[in-house]
Amino acid sequence: MMITEISPEIHNKLLQIVGDSYVFSDQETRNHYGHDETEDYVFPPNVVVKPANAFEISEIMKLANEYKIPVTPIGGRTGLSGGALSIHKGIGLSTERLNKILEIDERNLQVTTEPAVITQVLREAVAEKIFLST
């Protein structure tokens, strides 16, 4: 059985994982994270959580699994296909704090980034690295 409501106990556990500043249950935030550019569909999660690292994501997923709460990963919110809509409610897992460029490997022409790196920021970092090495 899937649980879609977030009890005060679960809400408090989420606060312990990511901190007070990164758990949102107000209607405005939930609606903002509950839509993309797909027509006028709005499927807000019950709560939006913004983890900062893989450990926090792991803890959120363990909690969701324990209580059978659906989780919808939410990336940069530029979606055009409804892929990040919380149709089952639950937890909206925003990756926007995961925005670091981890490595620019010039020799192999590869970069390693966290999921929320903005393409323009990446392009500028690569251009700067190339400029500095010439």
Image (cartoon, grey):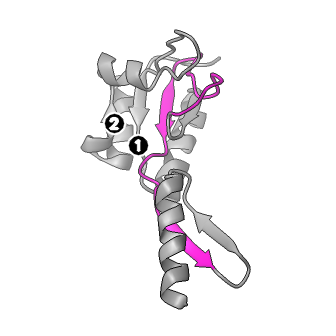
Q: CA distance from mark 1 to mark 2?
A: 7 Å
Residue 42: x percent and y percent?
Answer: 49, 12
Q: Residues within 10 Å of mark 2 (few under 14, many from 20)?
A: many
Work out which residue is located at the far left of the displayed protein and give it.
20
Secondary-structure class at tag 1: loop
Residue 97: x percent and y percent?
Answer: 41, 51
Q: Residue at x 46, y 56 (%)?
A: 99
Query: In the shown orientation, is residue 14 left or right of residue 41?
Result: left
Work out which residue is located at the far right of the displayed protein and give it.
108
Assess whether mark 2 and mark 1 are in contact (beta carbons under 8 angstroms).
Answer: yes
Q: Which residues are magenta?
A: 78-105
Q: Residues within 10 Å of mark 1 (few under 14, many from 20)?
A: many
Q: Callout 2, which amino acid?
A: Val
Q: Magenta segment: does it hold 88?
A: yes
Q: Which quadrant, please, contains the C terminus?
A: bottom right
Residue 78, above or below 121: above
Residue in front for this viewpoint, 39 or 123: 123
Determine which residue is flagged by label 1.
Answer: 50
> Is any atom of residue 126 visible in this view?
yes
Looking at the image, tell me whether mark 1 or mark 2 is earlier in sequence order.
2
> Tag on residue 23?
2
- Assign the magenta stretch its main secondary structure: loop
Q: Callout 1, which amino acid?
A: Lys
How many numbered marks are there? Answer: 2
Query: In the shown orientation, is residue 85 left or right of residue 49?
Result: right
Residue 7: x percent and y percent?
Answer: 38, 22
Q: Which quadrant, please, contains the N terminus?
A: top right
Q: Residue at x 36, y 48 (%)?
A: 18
Residue 132, above or below 120: below
Secondary-structure class at tag 2: strand
